[in-house]
Image (cartoon, grey):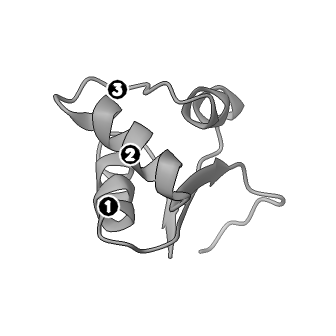
Amino acid sequence: MTVIGIGYIGFPTAILFAKYGYQVTGIDISPWVITQLNADFIHIEEPGLEQDLQEVFLTGNFFAITPTCFSLVF
Protein backbone atom coordinates (compact mmCIF):
# COMPACT_ATOMS: atom_id res chain seq x y z
CA MET A 1 0.00 0.00 0.00
CA THR A 2 1.24 3.50 -0.74
CA VAL A 3 0.30 6.66 1.12
CA ILE A 4 1.12 9.85 -0.76
CA GLY A 5 1.78 12.72 1.60
CA ILE A 6 2.79 11.68 5.10
CA GLY A 7 1.80 14.72 7.08
CA TYR A 8 -0.89 15.18 9.72
CA ILE A 9 -3.41 12.97 7.90
CA GLY A 10 -1.31 10.60 5.81
CA PHE A 11 1.26 9.64 8.44
CA PRO A 12 -1.14 8.39 11.15
CA THR A 13 -3.16 6.66 8.42
CA ALA A 14 -0.05 4.90 7.10
CA ILE A 15 0.99 3.80 10.59
CA LEU A 16 -2.51 2.45 11.32
CA PHE A 17 -2.49 0.30 8.18
CA ALA A 18 1.05 -0.88 8.99
CA LYS A 19 -0.05 -1.87 12.52
CA TYR A 20 -2.73 -4.06 10.96
CA GLY A 21 -0.16 -5.95 8.91
CA TYR A 22 -0.10 -4.09 5.60
CA GLN A 23 3.23 -3.29 3.95
CA VAL A 24 3.08 0.51 3.69
CA THR A 25 5.29 2.87 1.73
CA GLY A 26 4.93 6.52 2.67
CA ILE A 27 5.83 9.05 -0.02
CA ASP A 28 6.54 12.71 0.68
CA ILE A 29 8.31 15.45 -1.26
CA SER A 30 10.17 16.67 1.83
CA PRO A 31 13.56 14.96 2.19
CA TRP A 32 13.68 16.18 5.81
CA VAL A 33 10.44 14.36 6.66
CA ILE A 34 11.68 11.16 5.02
CA THR A 35 15.01 11.34 6.86
CA GLN A 36 13.27 11.89 10.20
CA LEU A 37 10.84 9.01 9.73
CA ASN A 38 13.41 6.52 8.53
CA ALA A 39 15.55 7.44 11.55
CA ASP A 40 12.56 6.55 13.78
CA PHE A 41 11.67 10.15 14.70
CA ILE A 42 8.21 11.59 14.16
CA HIS A 43 7.74 15.06 12.73
CA ILE A 44 4.25 15.74 14.09
CA GLU A 45 2.69 15.78 17.55
CA GLU A 46 0.30 12.91 18.12
CA PRO A 47 -0.05 10.97 21.37
CA GLY A 48 1.13 7.37 20.99
CA LEU A 49 2.34 7.79 17.42
CA GLU A 50 6.04 7.54 18.26
CA GLN A 51 5.50 4.16 19.95
CA ASP A 52 3.40 2.99 17.00
CA LEU A 53 6.17 4.01 14.57
CA GLN A 54 8.73 2.02 16.55
CA GLU A 55 6.40 -0.99 16.50
CA VAL A 56 5.88 -0.94 12.74
CA PHE A 57 9.60 -0.47 12.12
CA LEU A 58 10.25 -3.64 14.10
CA THR A 59 7.77 -5.54 11.93
CA GLY A 60 9.17 -3.99 8.75
CA ASN A 61 5.72 -2.86 7.64
CA PHE A 62 6.55 0.82 7.06
CA PHE A 63 9.20 2.81 5.28
CA ALA A 64 9.27 6.27 3.74
CA ILE A 65 10.69 7.49 0.42
CA THR A 66 10.72 10.62 -1.70
CA PRO A 67 9.24 10.39 -5.20
CA THR A 68 11.72 9.52 -7.92
CA CYS A 69 9.98 11.84 -10.34
CA PHE A 70 7.43 14.60 -10.03
CA SER A 71 4.06 14.54 -11.66
CA LEU A 72 1.29 17.05 -12.13
CA VAL A 73 -1.28 14.28 -11.77
CA PHE A 74 -1.46 11.30 -9.40
Res 5 visible: no
Q: Residue furthest front?
A: 58
Q: List x then y, in percent, for residue 12.
A: 30, 48
- Which quadrant, please, contains the C terminus? bottom right
Q: Which residue is mark 1?
A: 19
* Viewer-side residue, 58 vs 13: 58
Return the residue at label 2: 55
Q: Residue at the spot x=55%, y=34% of the render? A: 37
Position of residue 66 relative to residue 23, above or below, is above
**Quadrant of residue 34 in the image?**
top right
SS at mark 3?
Answer: loop
Residue at 62% over, 73% down: 73
Regarding mark 1 in the picture, which secondary structure is present there?
Answer: helix
Q: Amino acid at mark 3?
A: Ile
Establish if 7 lies above or below 25: above
Q: Residue at x 77, y 59 (%)?
A: 70
Q: Is residue 29 above or below residue 63?
A: above
